[in-house]
Image (tube, rainbow, N blue to C red):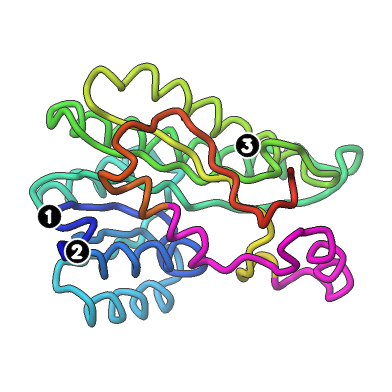
């Protein structure tokens, strides 16, 4: 059976750990050439080594996703190295949690830049190449917090809601060129970010999830694989909540 991403080239931002790493590994196992960005050199080199055990078509970039010129250099090099770009996964993101009354302007700006501007950067640069190809799949990582909000995360919720608006606008702008844009809205997923929460908080969240478990990065990666593949060829502008039923 042919692999689902055979012959495709994918770029995953924030691909050295958590959800991003799970996506990069799964894409590689399904035949894609995989490029990914990272910040931590140790994590990046480790992920690159693991990917090379799956495919020889892999390249990591230590890059700040918030810098437009850096994003352009990365994408230009991906196309130079692999010949094209078929799939973009915007996964890089940060949190700076706090109640609105105590939130600093810097906390707001950091999250809006880290989560939203970074997505704009890579969407704009990649879409230029995808339009020439008249094909491509853009997958933007939002959050159920961006759909429903969450106390203590006004900045994060606003940035992730912005990603949804950006994704749906891109779907309308780029659809005639054969480019699809969809968003994934994960719920409570076991990552480094959620491990920082107390056991009491984690237990409370899990008890509110109908499936009675936290999600794993692989749960999100499987949905990303579907959106990256031709199986979702008639889907664009959608937001897929992957949250174990918490927000139904």
**Location of mark 1 (residue):** 7
- Quick one: SS at disc 2? loop
Residue 31 badge: 2
- Please tell me which residue is depicted at 77% across the width and 45% down the height of the picture: 153
| Residue 6 point in image, percent of width and height | 16, 58
Span shown in magenta = 195-223
Tell me the distance, in whole angstroms, between the alpha carbons under discs 2 and 3: 32 Å
Tell me the distance, in whole angstroms, between the alpha carbons under discs 1 and 3: 33 Å
- Please tell me which residue is depicted at 31% across the width and 21% down the height of the picture: 174
The answer to whether residue 206 is magenta is yes
Residue 25 as seen in the image, left or right of residue 105:
left
Comes first in the chain, label 2 or label 3 = 2
Residue 208 as seen in the image, left or right of residue 188:
right
Residue 88 badge: none
Residue 212 as seen in the image, left or right of residue 230:
right
| Residue 111 point in image, percent of width and height | 63, 44
- Please tell me which residue is depicted at 18% across the width and 73% down the height of the picture: 55
Of 24 and 94, the residue lying toward us: 24
- Quick one: SS at disc 3? helix
Comes first in the chain, label 1 or label 2 = 1
- Mark 1–mark 2 contact, CB under 8 Å? yes
- Please tell me which residue is depicted at 31% across the width and 80% down the height of the picture: 50
Residue 159 badge: 3
Packing grade of label 2 (10 A; few <14, some 14-19, many >=20) is some
Of 147 and 83, the residue lying toward us: 147
């Amino acid at each position: 059976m042919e692999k689902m991403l055979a012959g495709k080239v994918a770029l995953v931002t924030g691909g050295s750990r958590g959800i991003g790493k799970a996506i990069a590994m799964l894409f590689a196992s399904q035949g894609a050439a995989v490029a990914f960005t990272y910040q931590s050199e140790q994590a990046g080199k480790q992920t690159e080594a693991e990917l090379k055990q799956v495919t020889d078509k892999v390249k990591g970039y230590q890059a700040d996703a918030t810098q437009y010129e850096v994003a352009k250099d990365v994408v230009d090099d991906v196309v130079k190295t692999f010949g094209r770009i078929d799939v973009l996964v915007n996964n890089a993101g940060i949190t700076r949690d706090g109640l609105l009354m105590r939130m600093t302007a810097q906390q707001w700006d950091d999250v809006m830049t880290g989560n939203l501007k970074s997505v704009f950067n890579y969407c704009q640069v990649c879409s230029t190449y995808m339009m020439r190809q008249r094909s491509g799949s853009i997958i933007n990582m939002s959050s159920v917090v961006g759909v429903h909000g969450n106390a203590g995360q006004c900045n994060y919720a606003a940035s992730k809601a912005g990603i949804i608006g950006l994704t749906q606008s891109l779907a309308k702008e780029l659809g005639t060129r054969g480019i699809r844009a969809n968003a994934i809205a994960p719920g409570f997923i076991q990552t480094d970010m959620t491990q920082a929460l107390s056991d009491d908080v984690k237990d409370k969240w899990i008890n509110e999830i109908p499936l009675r478990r936290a999600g794993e990065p692989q749960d999100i990666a499987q949905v990303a694989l579907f959106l990256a593949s031709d199986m979702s060829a008639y889907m664009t502008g959608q937001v897929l909540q992957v949250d174990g039923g918490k927000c139904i």
